[in-house]
Image: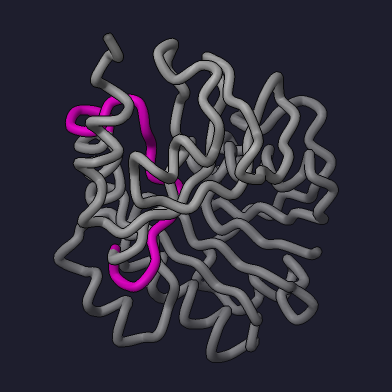
Amino acid sequence: MKLIIAGCGRVGAELAKIVSRKGHEVNVIDIDPEAFDRLDEDFRGRTIQGDVRDKAVLERADIENADGFAAVTPRDDINLVAAQAASKLFHVPNVVARVYDSNHSRVFALSGLHTIITTTWGAHRMEQLLTHPGSLEIASLGNGAVRILEVHIPAHLSGSSIADITARCDCRPTALIRGGEAALVDEDTRLMQGDLLIVALQSTYLPNMDDLLNAEEG
């Protein structure tokens, strides 16, 4: 895929590293030439100095042929203008914008843009770690009605089968990660301490999962 990242701050540089290492063609835009120093030495994409709101700069980044565009500058107004240009003017099929101030989220939503709200996302992740130890939400569906969790298997569940887990907690296990290798599971799959189990469950059953993970068996 040909991807454009508008902004080479910490988030933009990290995003560029991730997608570049996955083999995508990446062009990074920033008005500050020193910002490109954040990129890895082995970064193989292009860097374009200029204002991401400038049509000519976007054209230099070959936006007409882009498959995706990420607006991750430190300013919401710049991200909004750049993302709208990518979506409405150049018809990039997948556009994502970072939002720093949650008060601005409605403006981005009315523009039909996919957004990541930095403060809300960070607070949400912190709340999960504080109130649901042992599991981490990796996705949600239907405004949070269904949660996809990465569950860290504790010692007292080692040896349990997937059937044991579903009988004690109304969830739907789908995959298991062990030693960096992932595989689908069935009812007979046995768990080991340290495994990461990917499960889907209704939000109302999160307390059941907490009890399962944190209540030592006698």
Image coordinates of residue 43 in percent, x first then y, are 78, 36
Quadrant housing residue 70? bottom right
Q: Which residue is pictured at 47% across the width and 81% down the height? A: 84
Q: Which residues are magenta?
A: 129-144
The colour scheme of the drawn protein is one colour
Asked whether 137 falls inside the magenta stretch, the response is: yes
Q: Which residue is pictured at 34% across the width and 39% down the height? A: 168
Image coordinates of residue 112 in percent, x first then y, are 40, 85
* Residue 130 horizontal side relative to residue 94, left or right: left
Q: Which residue is pictured at 53% across the width and 90% down the height? A: 88
Please tell me which residue lies in front, 112 or 53. Answer: 112
* Picture layout, residue 3 above or below residue 199: below
* Residue 216 horizontal side relative to residue 35, left or right: left
Quadrant housing residue 75? bottom left
* Residue 8 horizontal side relative to residue 120, left or right: right
Image coordinates of residue 113 in percent, x first then y, are 42, 78
Asked whether 87 falls inside the magenta stretch, the response is: no
Q: Which residue is pictured at 47% across the width and 23% down the height? A: 153
* Picture layout, residue 47 above or below residue 216: below
Image coordinates of residue 157 in percent, x first then y, are 44, 20
